[in-house]
Image (cartoon, helix red, strand yellow):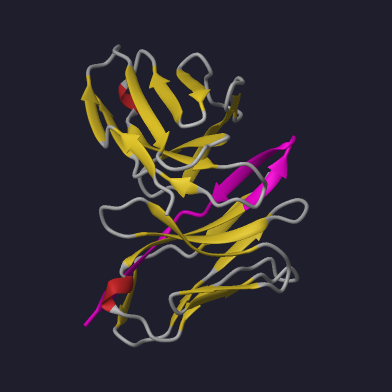
Amino acid sequence: GDSVTQMEGPVTLSEEAFLTINCTYTATGYPSLFWYVQYPGEGLQLLLKATKADDKGSNKGFEATYRKETTSFHLEKGSVQVSDSAVYFCALRSLSGGYQKVTFGIGTKLQVIP
Amino acid sequence: GAVVSQHPSWVICKSGTSVKIECRSLDFQATTMFWYRQFPKQSLMLMATSNEGSKATYEQGVEKDKFLINHASLTLSTLTVTSAHPEDSSFYICSATATGPNEKLFFGSGTQLSVL
């Protein structure tokens, strides 16, 4: 079945540091890939997505590129801010048996310190 | 933007009682809703997929009679945990999407269930 593996946190960075959160997946077919973010006390929000190989999703300074050859979708940001402190979930969406299915990674907690 | 409201945000109940969790899409018609549960330090695990007006499709290992899902309208899905036991204590979260495979998913804020 489908699966998503992402690095386990917590990740602690100083403000303006470079961020990478690794995510790899296994899936049949051609899934869409997502990064979701959960800020403290809030629900999950879509951060960015990519629907086919070599697509780059970007939002709020975050980027991730759909790499089919390495089955990866690593999240990056050049300069993190304290406000980026949250839990980040990598996910894939596939069609199975005619309906949608979403599989999440474990979530990576990011803490940015001033 | 689209919002999904999930209620209650937390609930404590006695063993043997039933608990209902509601998931509402506030400004769009949710043709498909998903229910997940998350144990501490584990990933969100899909429990079931429900399409409006039809029976829910449950993932392997999820008891249909224990976790009753109703998706009677395009804006409301409910998950009822029947005869809850302490091992059912978990974080439950719903998500909703409109028609089409590439539509966004919107998530509720989750429900923390504690069964005593």
As rendered, which of A46 and B84 lies closer to the eye?
A: A46
In the drawing, does residue A96 fall left or right of residue A50? right
In the drawing, does residue A27 fall left or right of residue B93? right
Residue visible at 51% across and 54% down?
A105
As rendered, which of B66 and B7 lies closer to the eye?
A: B7
Residue visible at 64% across and 68% down?
A72
In the drawing, does residue B82 fall left or right of residue B30? left
Please provide percent x and percent y for residue A103.
57, 48
Q: Quadrant of the N terminus of chain B?
A: bottom left
Please provide percent x and percent y for residue A19.
43, 80
Is residue B43 visible in the rendered image? The answer is no
The image quarter containing residue A98 is top right
Please provide percent x and percent y for residue B43.
46, 48
- Judge whether A110 appears above or below A34 on screen: below
Kindly report the secondary structure that dominates the magenta region of the rendered protein.
strand
**Is residue B97 found inside the magenta-colored segment of the image?**
no
Tally the numbered discs.
Answer: 0
**Is residue A98 found inside the magenta-colored segment of the image?**
yes
Residue farthest toward the right in the current orientation of the protein = A29
Query: Bounds of the magenta span?
Result: A93-114
The image quarter containing residue A9 is bottom left
Please provide percent x and percent y for residue B48.
55, 31
- Judge whether A69 appears above or below A61 on screen: above
The image quarter containing residue A80 is bottom left
Q: Quadrant of the C terminus of chain B?
A: top left
Residue visible at 73% across and 68% down?
A53
Is residue B66 visible in the rendered image? The answer is yes
- Judge whether B10 appears above or below B44 on screen: above
In the drawing, does residue B14 fall left or right of residue A31? left
